[in-house]
């Protein structure tokens, strides 16, 4: 069973993503900020991280993604960044940070599932 870590500072968004994925074969975990995401990622070693870009605290989604890429234990974790910012430069910054995909909020549940399925095929 694949492990997913959902990271967003809004509980409602985490709940919507969880509801989208509940019918798939995933073990789902949650974190509310970048610091908690890094702690959980190191503990859980998730297959996928679905992470908001803009979060309060010391580590935003871009920095957390960079840290995951730099950590040998998390290097193979697939990161999908989620953001309300949809400019080309925002997407480019996300991909430069090491994200495998960048979804602009609001996104359809089907788009999220398709993105995960595409990454699953890469594994």
Image (cartoon, helix red, strand yellow):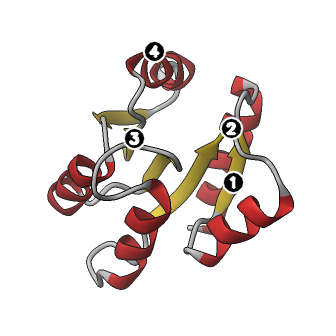
Cα distance in 3D space between marks 1 and 2: 10 Å
**Tag 2, which secondary structure?**
loop
Going 48% across and 47% down the picture, which residue do you hit? Answer: 51
Residue 21 lies, in percent from the top left, at 52, 26
Residue 6 lies, in percent from the top left, at 41, 38
Q: Bin the neighbour count of mark 4 within 10 Å (Cα to Cα): few under 14, some 14-19, many 20 and up.
A: few
Going 52% across and 19% down the picture, which residue do you hit? Answer: 23
Residue 56 lies, in percent from the top left, at 36, 43
Q: Residue furthest front?
A: 57
Instruction: Mark 4 vs mark 2: give the one in front.
Output: 2
Q: Is residue 111 left or right of residue 76?
A: right
Which residue is identified by label 1? Answer: 102
Above or below, 24 relative to 87: above
Quarter holding the N terminus?
top left
- State which tag comes first along the sequence, 1 or 4: 4
Is the residue under label 2 in contact with that under label 4 (CB below 8 Å)? no
**Tag 4, which secondary structure?**
helix
Residue 92 lies, in percent from the top left, at 74, 70
Which residue is identified by label 2? Answer: 84
Q: Residue furthest right?
A: 88
Residue 12, label in figure: 4
Which residue is identified by label 3? Answer: 7
Q: Is residue 39 left or right of residue 59?
A: left
Above or below, 9 relative to 80: above
Is the residue under label 3 in contact with that under label 4 (CB below 8 Å)? no
Cα distance in 3D space between marks 1 and 4: 20 Å
Going 33% across and 72% down the picture, which residue do you hit? Answer: 74
**Nearest to the observer: residue 114 or residue 79:** 79
């Amino acid at each position: 069973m694949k492990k997913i870590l959902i990271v967003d500072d809004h509980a409602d968004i985490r709940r919507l993503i969880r509801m989208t994925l509940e019918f798939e074969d995933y073990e789902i975990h949650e974190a509310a900020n970048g610091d908690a995401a890094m702690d959980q990622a190191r503990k859980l070693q998730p297959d996928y991280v679905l992470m908001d870009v803009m979060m309060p605290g010391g580590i935003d989604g871009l920095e957390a993604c960079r840290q995951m890429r730099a950590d040998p234990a998390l290097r193979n974790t697939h990161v999908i960044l989620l953001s309300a910012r949809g400019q080309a430069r925002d997407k480019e910054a996300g991909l430069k940070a090491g994200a495998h995909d960048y979804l602009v909020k609001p996104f359809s549940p089907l788009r999220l599932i398709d993105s995960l399925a595409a990454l699953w095929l890469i594994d």
